[in-house]
Amino acid sequence: MTTVKENRERAKAERAAVTQSRIVDAASELFRERGYVATTIDAVAERAGVVVQTIYNSVGNKAAVLNAVFDATVSGPESPLSVPEFMRARMDAADGLEGAVEVLTDWLVDVNARAHGIHALIRQAAAIDADVAELERSRALRRLHNYEGAAARFRELGGVDACSTDAEVAAAIWAVGHPDAYRALVLDSGWTEDAYRSWLRRSLLALSAS
């Protein structure tokens, strides 16, 4: 049986989550409309219907707001779950090595199609904002580290020979699935999504069986 205090704390946490979601949604809209530099915390607060201090209290400075927008974008419909949380569950449920490759292929196609714009925004902002530059660097390293989980799962399912470490396979996945590869192939070279998916699947199968 929950106590009155526990109910109040839960209600408070739920209100905070709703407020943070409004801030992230407002910031996402403004970043896409105006770019990073022209978007101010004041403008985000006005669109979200909160005071400026609420943004600093619940999310942080402008770079932190951009980070929160990125998290929401890459998680997509699974938000507020983090990518490692739901991808670990999907990979664990995959049927065999090819099934795990399909899971990762689907995820990379989906996330790159959805998030290539925010990646470009972060790159532009990183050139003028040291906090965003650090954000870009740390997220790239985190993504690289997370792919070690996929490499380990491939190994469990009979892929990845003893000559390759999980870190090496993760680095290869990171390179093949990088948003820059998506941008170069699909946005710049005009590949269809089906062609990109097929190439990505074959590339990941080759990596997982290396």
Image (cartoon, grey):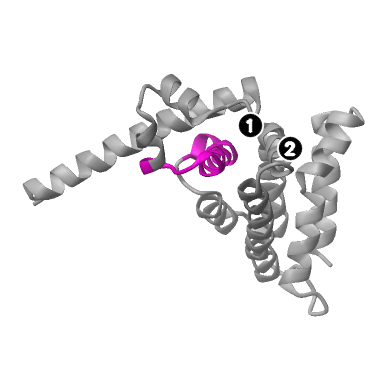
Q: Which residue position is annotated with label 1?
A: 36
- Tag 2: amino acid: Gln
Residue appearing at x 51%, y 34% in the figure = 77
Residue appearing at x 66%, y 44% in the figure = 129
Whether residue 191 is visible, yes or no, is no
Q: Are marks 2 and 1 in contact (CB under 8 Å)?
A: yes
The residue furthest right is 189
Q: Which residue position is annotated with label 2?
A: 124
Residue appearing at x 73%, y 70% in the figure = 167
Give the Cα separation between the discs numbered 2 and 1. 8 Å
Q: Nearer the viewer, residue 126 or 92?
A: 126
Instruction: Decide which of tag 2 and tag 1 comes sooner along the chain.
Output: 1
The region drawn magenta spans 57-79
Q: Which quadrant of the structure image shows residue 160?
A: bottom right
Residue 130 rendering spot, x and y as whole percentages: 65, 49
Dominant secondary structure, magenta: helix
Q: Which quadrant of the structure image shows residue 150?
A: bottom right
Residue 179 rendering spot, x and y as whole percentages: 76, 43
How packed mark 1 is, by other alpha carbons closer than 10 Å (few <14, some 14-19, many 20 or more), is many
Q: Which quadrant of the structure image shows residue 97?
A: bottom right
Label 1: element kind:
loop
